[in-house]
Each structure stands twice: as C-alpha cells, then as structure tokens.
Amino acid sequence: MVGAGFAACVVTLAATPLVIAYMRRLSVLDVANERTLHTRPTPRGGGAAVVLGLFSGVVFTVLTSGRASAPDLLPMTLAVTLFGLLGLAEDVGGDIGGIAPLRRLALQALAAAALTAMTVVSVAIGAGRPGLGMVAAAVVIGPVWITGFVNAFNFMDGVNGISATQATVAGVGYALVGTVHHSPPLVAGGTVLAGAALGFAPFNMPRALVFLGDVGSYAIGGAIAALALQAAVSGVPVEAVAAPVVLYLADTATTLVRRIRTGERWYLPHRGHAYQRLVTAGWSHTTVAGYTGVLAAFCAGLGLVSATTVAVPVRVCADLMICFLVARYLGAPRRVATRRGGVEAPGRTPSPAPADRLATSPADRSPDGAAGEPAGETADATLTVPAQRAPAERAAGTVKQ
C-alpha cells in the first residue's frame, strides 16, 4: 500500500508544474483586483494534478494487488471523477460564468446519490455485509453527508497549505483505521490520498505557486467523504470515522449557525471561520495550516481508540479529549487576539458587497476558491487589510461559507 501512496505522490509532483503551465496558457488565473488579497495573477486548477495522482495510486494498487484481490477503490474513484469534473468545469469555465449555482448544487446532489449507491453495493458484495439498518441509514444520510462535506472542504480551503495538510491527516487517519479494522479499501484509499496531498503541498506552501481550485477541493472533499462513508457502512465506529475531519466540520457548522443566529446573510462573503480569524489576529498561513494539522492529527489519533477498544469509559475519555481539542481550536482566534493586545475581528459580511450575489467571477474568488485570505505571492504575510476587501464566496456549492 505504501507503494501506491508513493506513486500518487510522485505523479502529483511531476504533473503539477505541467498543470501550472497549461492553466497559464488557458489564462485560468486568479487576477488581483481591489477585492482580492494576492498581488499578482496566480494559476488556479492545480488540483487537476492531485486528481491525476489519485488515479495513478488507484491504478498502481490494482496492478500490484491483482484484479481479483485488489481493494475495492471504486467509491473513491467515482467520487474523484464526478466531483473533480464538476470542479474542473467551474475552474475552466469560470470566465464565462461557470455552472449556475442551483444547477451546481443539483449536480453535486446527484453525484452524491450515485456515490452512496456505489458505496453500499461495494461494501455489500465485499466482506462488510452491512445490516439492513446501516444500509437504510446510509441511503438517507449518505447524499447529505457527501454534498455537505464537499462544500465544507471547499469553504475551509482558504489559506496556503491547509487543504494539503488536512488531506494528508485524513488519508493517514483512515489508513490507520483500515489497518486496525482490517479494511484494505480504507488502507489503500487513505494511503493514496495522503500521497497525492503531499505531492501537491510544495507548490502551495509556504508560498502558493498555484491554487488548488474547485477541481482540487471538490475532488479531495469527495474522496474523503467517500472513504468516511465506506468506513461507516463497513461498521467502523462513528468516532473513528468523524475524528480525522472533525475540525473542518466543527468550524463550518459553528460559523454557519453563528451567522444565522446573528441575522447575517450567511451566503455573503465573510471572515467568520476560525482559521480566517487566526490570520486576521496575526498568524501566518503556515502557522495556521500547521496548527490545524497538528490538532487534526491528535483528533484522528484519539478517534482510533474507538476502533481498537470496546471499553466504554476509555472511549468516552477519548471522545471528551476530542471535544476539548475542538473547543481549543474554535477559541484560538480570541486567545491570539487577546495576547496580541487587540480586539478579535468579528468576521462579518464585508461592506460594500453585491447583495444576493450567488455566482462569482474568477476575479472575485480568493485562492483555491476560498474565503478571502491572502495567498499567492505572500503566502505567510500577516493579514492587515480591512475585512471589507474579502472576495465573494459561495455557500452550499454556491457562496463560500
């Protein structure tokens, strides 16, 4: 399995410079303007190289394992294909408006439904043998989970290196879960995902030579969602499934709830995510990505406890420690701002901003289709520009959250 991860890493490393050159040739660029924070045109769509790396890792796994005994990576492959194509259409076609917001959301939901069906069938004909209750739960929850997480991953893709770091942690986490749970698909899929993410990281941090783009954030988000669903249907405890991505889920959920409760139009641009507020408080992109990655790794490790023991007190203690780490992460922006003698930025909707603007042009997007954080030429620069310069975002596949 390590060989598959190495293959994914090498292919991504080799393909990324070619993708950068090709995207420049097609003028698929995020151009600096009065609403963006990078200082020069930077290619987007670098996630296409990650997709190639993922495919290469899957092919390597099949060729080295033999077709009969190869781990079932069809769900992850389908996720990368469908969501990667959707993201690529948005990146390349963005200059002419891309995909209409509601149509994009509908396509995501259809892809999620197909992926859910594929996952249930894949596990059912394999060694998993899920019960009827688990199948029913997967059919109902699966499409919502996949669509939601793909968009959550896209929302969180806002500082250099954070997506590559999270994908690496999630990949290693699910590979370890698969090891202790005797699930070859999780081991292979997680290893390939981690390898591809590591191959992309040097081009996106500490200084971004290319942005992941929707093709990358959608494909990686889909791959992680597919692995998580496959793990859940196979009987992996829910703590072990959620732990590797719990920070992303918590940040997205709490930000959305807070904005709705305060009466803000949640679909408009903002700087309300914890990782955004950390940059606003003075941390560099590298520091934020590293901090998030370390906490995510600890959470993933604690999640393994539920996969290795049935002792309820031990699992409860591990779960409480995960909750503590999540609380520390969500409270970090306020602590950092207080230590620096400042007042934490509220992260509210910038003004002026186009009202009810659901579809954005590429010039209005921040790096990696993310929520208005500095990237590109000065990846580690402290954010000092006012919040009102944040670019437009998209929620639920339409406006960044």
Image: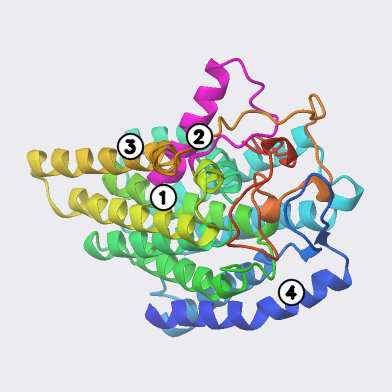
Relative image position of residue 141 (x, y in whole percent): 46, 33
Task: Point out the stretch of residues depicted in magenta.
Answer: 245-274
Relative image position of residue 68 (x, y in whole percent): 42, 75
Task: Report the amino acid beneath label 3.
Answer: Ala
**Label 1 crowd (10 A; few <14 / some 14-19 / many >=20):** many
**Quarter of the rendering occupied by the C terminus:** top right
- Residue designated by label 2: 344
Taking the spot 47% from the left edge, 54% from the top edge, the residue there is 288
Which of marks 2 and 3 precedes in the sequence?
A: 3
- Residue designated by label 3: 327
- Residue designated by label 4: 19
- 316 horizontally vs 213: left or right: left
- Residue designated by label 1: 228
Confirm whether residue 214 shows in the render: no
**Label 4 crowd (10 A; few <14 / some 14-19 / many >=20):** many
Q: Quadrant of the rendered structure where residue 147 is?
A: top right
User: Marks 3 and 2: which is nearer the front?
Assistant: 2
Q: Give the CA separation, mark 3 to mark 2.
A: 17 Å
Q: Give the CA separation, mark 4 to mark 1.
A: 29 Å
Q: Quick check: marks 1 and 3 in contact, CB under 8 Å? A: no
Which of marks 3 and 1 precedes in the sequence?
A: 1
Which of marks 2 and 1 precedes in the sequence?
A: 1
Element marked by disc 2: loop
Task: Report the amino acid beneath label 4.
Answer: Val
Of residues 246 and 330, which is closer to you in this image?
A: 330
